[in-house]
Image (cartoon, coloured by chain):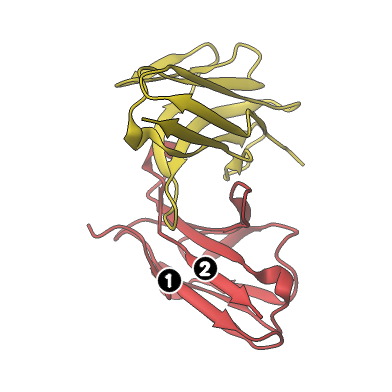
Chain colours: A yellow, B red
């Protein structure tokens, strides 16, 4: 089945630094989304991308839908303590499946 | 709009027991999804409903698992004869329809099978 490979698995950065993470697949996806999950809670949507090449921002977050439709990246600029958490990419596979496939997550830790 | 509600938040059970989880979606949302998430992994799709019809089931949903959504409102997920490998967070999500930005997750039910 479709799988999403997310990297890095974890990041340890200083407050104020920029962060970049990405997600790749061997399959084509129609939609890419990025979620953040805090401990004991469900994922919360950060950015949704619907077209190949699309670049979308949400405050300090920027994400892009890769041209090949097989990858996406998320950047966070000027990180702050509340950015700590686990970030997941998710995608709707091409072919009509009405479900999302998730990556393994990137755990972000910020040193003040 | 109170969000997606899941009960219980935590469940501890002994191996071999049956457990049932409930999900109350956002009012008027016609799609309801169940996902399972184990420690250190992303959510894995289990099944989804469009109104009361169960339209897709993952191969992860063994015959010990059954999900229902009577009347197209709340949903239940039952696991029979629980095994230690069933220990996970079970997440419910609901949406009115695509686009996916309208999909909202509940806080999950954390199952521990001893």
The answer to whether residue B77 is above or below residue A58 is below
Q: Quadrant of residue A60?
A: top left
Residue A41 rendering spot, x and y as whole percentages: 42, 55
| Classed neighbour count for the residue bearing mark 2: other residues with Cα under 10 Å, few (<14), some (14–19), many (≥20) | many
Q: What's the residue at 60%, 11% (across, down)?
A: A67
Q: What's the residue at 73%, 38% (across, down)?
A: A2
Question: Which element carries disc 2, helix, strand or loop?
Answer: strand
Left or right, A87 with respect to B86, comes to left
The answer to whether residue B16 is above or below residue A54 is below
* Towards the viewer: B107 or B1: B107
Residue matched to label 1: B9
Res. B21 in view: no
Q: What's the residue at 58%, 50% (across, down)?
A: B43
Q: Quadrant of residue B78?
A: bottom right
* Towards the viewer: B47 or B71: B47
Left or right, A59 with respect to A89, comes to left
């Amino acid at each position: 089945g479709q799988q999403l490979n997310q990297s890095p698995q974890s990041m340890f950065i200083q407050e104020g630094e920029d962060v970049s993470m990405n997600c790749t697949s061997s399959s084509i996806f129609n939609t890419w989304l990025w979620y953040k999950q805090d401990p004991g809670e469900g994922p919360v949507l950060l950015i949704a991308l619907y077209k190949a090449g699309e670049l979308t921002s949400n405050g300090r977050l920027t994400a892009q839908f890769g041209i090949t439709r097989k990858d996406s990246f998320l950047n966070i600029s000027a990180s702050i303590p509340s950015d700590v958490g686990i970030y997941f990419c998710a995608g709707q596979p091409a072919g009509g499946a009405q479900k999302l496939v998730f990556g393994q997550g990137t755990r972000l830790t910020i040193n003040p | 709009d109170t969000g997606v509600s899941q009960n219980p938040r935590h469940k501890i059970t002994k191996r071999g027991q049956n457990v049932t989880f409930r999900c109350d979606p956002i009012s008027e949302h016609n799609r309801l999804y169940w996902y399972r998430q184990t420690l250190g992994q992303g959510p894995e799709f289990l099944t989804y409903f469009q109104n009361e019809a169960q339209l897709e089931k993952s191969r992860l949903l063994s015959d010990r698992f059954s999900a229902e959504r009577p009347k197209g409102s709340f949903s239940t997920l039952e696991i029979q004869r629980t095994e230690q490998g069933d220990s996970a967070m079970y997440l419910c999500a609901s949406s009115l329809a695509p686009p996916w930005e309208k999909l909202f997750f509940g806080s999950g039910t954390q199952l521990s099978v001893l």
